[in-house]
Amino acid sequence: MSDLSAAKAALKSQRIETPSWAYANSGTRFKVFAQKGVPRTPQEKLDDAARVQEVTGVAPVVALHIPWDRVDDYAALARHAEDLGLRVGAINSNVFQDDDYRLGSVTNPDPAVRRKAVDHLLECVDIMDATGSRDLKLWFSDGTNYPGQDDIVARQDRLAEALAEVYARLGDDQRMLLEYKLFEPAFYATDVPDWGTAYAHCRALGPKAQVVVDTGHHAPGTNIEFIVAVLLREGKLGGFDFNSRFYADDDLMVGAADPFQLFRIMFEVIRGGGLGPDTAFMLDQCHNIEPKIPAIIRSVMNVQEATAKALLVDVPALREAQRTGDVLGANAVLMDAYNTDVRPLLAEVREEMGLDPDPIAAYRRSGWAERIVAERVGGTQAGWGA
Ligand code: PSV
Ligand code: MN
Ligand code: MN
C-alpha cells in the first residue's frame, strides 16, 4: 500500500494493547529497582494506561494478568477502565508462580495439580465474562529440566486435555491465544517451545484457538516474520506479545533492539491482511531501569513507526520486481520504505486525530509523572509478580 491517505487511515485505526504489569515495578532475577509513584492497585495501573492512550490515541486496550491484577469486583474494574476511555484486553493466566507447579501445571504428572491449573484457567474465562475481554492468553512454564524426568508425549496429551476443557468453556466471541517460548524456566524440554507445537494444538482445538507470537521467545537469528506469514496464511495468528531481545527473553522496549525486524514483521502482517482487530497487538514488556509510562509511550510509537514504514512499501513495484526476478530491485523497494523517515507522517496523523504531534513531550507537560510521585504514597506498590 503506497497510497498516503490509506496509510494514514490504517495508522489511525490500529490498536495497540498495553500490559498492566509494565506499569508496575519489575526487575530481573537479581534486583527490582523500585520507582516512585508506580501503581499500588490494578485501578492505578489503568489510570496510568489512560495517560498512554491520551497522548497516543491508539492504545485504549489494557491486558490484565491474574493474579497480579486480582480484585473482588472485575465488572467494577472494567467500568473504571471504561470511565477512563479504556477497555480490558487479554486476560493473561498465571500457572507458573505456585509451589504446586514445580513439575508443571497442566502437564504435571499429578492430576490434582492439573485440576488446580485448569480451574485457574476457567476462572480467567469467568473474568473475561465479567470484564468483556475477548482473549484468554495462555503461557505455560511447563517442561522438564532433565532427560527422562517425564514422558514428553504424555505431557502433550495432558496439555491437549486441559486445553480442550478450557476451549469448551469459551463463549462465542471469546478466543484462547496460546503462547510458545523456546526455553525458560524449563531448560531440557519445554512443553510449548515453538510455533509448530502451539499451532498443532490450536488446529486440533478449532477456530477459537489462535497462536500468539511473543517476539522475545525465539532462538537468536529466528526468522520471526516467516512464522508470522505462515500463521496468517493458516488463519492462526491471534496476536503478538511485542518486546525486544538482545539475548533471551529480555522484555525490553519493542523496536529498540531491532527496528528492522519489527518492520519486516509488520510488512508480513499487512501483506497477510492481519492489521485489523483479529490480531491483538499487545506489548509484553518490563521497564526495569527506565521510567515506565514514557517507555510504554515510546514502545507504542515504535510499533507505529514500523507499521507506517510497512504501509509505505510500494507493493506493485515489489511484485513486478519479484515477477521479473529482479533480486536487487525487489530488495530496494523494501529498503526504500524502511529507510523512509515516517515521523513527519505520524506527526500529521496525530494532528489529524486532535493529538499533540509529540506524545512524549505531551506526557511530560501533563505533570502526571510528578503527580503520581506526590500522591501515590503509602500502601504497597504493585510489582511484577505482586
Ligand atoms: C512468559 O515469558 C511471558 O512472555 C508470558 O506472556 C507471561 O505471561 C509474561 O511473560 C509475563 O510478563
Ligand atoms: Mn509474553
Ligand atoms: Mn516472555
Image (cartoon, rainbow, N blue to C red):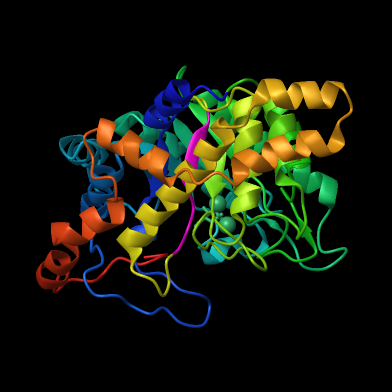
User: Which image quadrant is residue 212 in?
Assistant: top right
Q: Is residue 60 visible?
A: no
- Nearer-the-camera pick, 326 or 192: 326
The single residue placed furthest to the top in the displayed view is 172
Residue 112, position as x, y percentages in the image: 59, 50
> Does the magenta run of residues contain 179?
no
Image quadrant containing the C terminus? bottom left
Indicate the quadrant where residue 179 lies. top right
Give above or below for 20 relative to 310: below
Q: Position of residue 95 (x, y in %)?
A: 53, 53
In the rendering, at what x and y percent does residue 32 appear?
Answer: 41, 78
Relative side of 114 to 33, left or right: right
Q: Could you tell me which quadrant the N terminus lies in?
A: top right
Above or below, comparing residue 133 to residue 172 in the picture: below
Q: Could you tell whether 352 is left or right of 114 in the image?
A: left
**Viewer-closest of 108 and 50:** 50
Q: Residue at x 87, y 63 (%)?
A: 148
Please indicate whether residue 363 sits to the left or right of residue 107 in the image.
Answer: left
Residue 5 in the image, given as x and y percentages of width and height: 42, 22
Q: Which residues are magenta?
A: 279-286
Q: Quadrant of residue 100?
A: bottom right
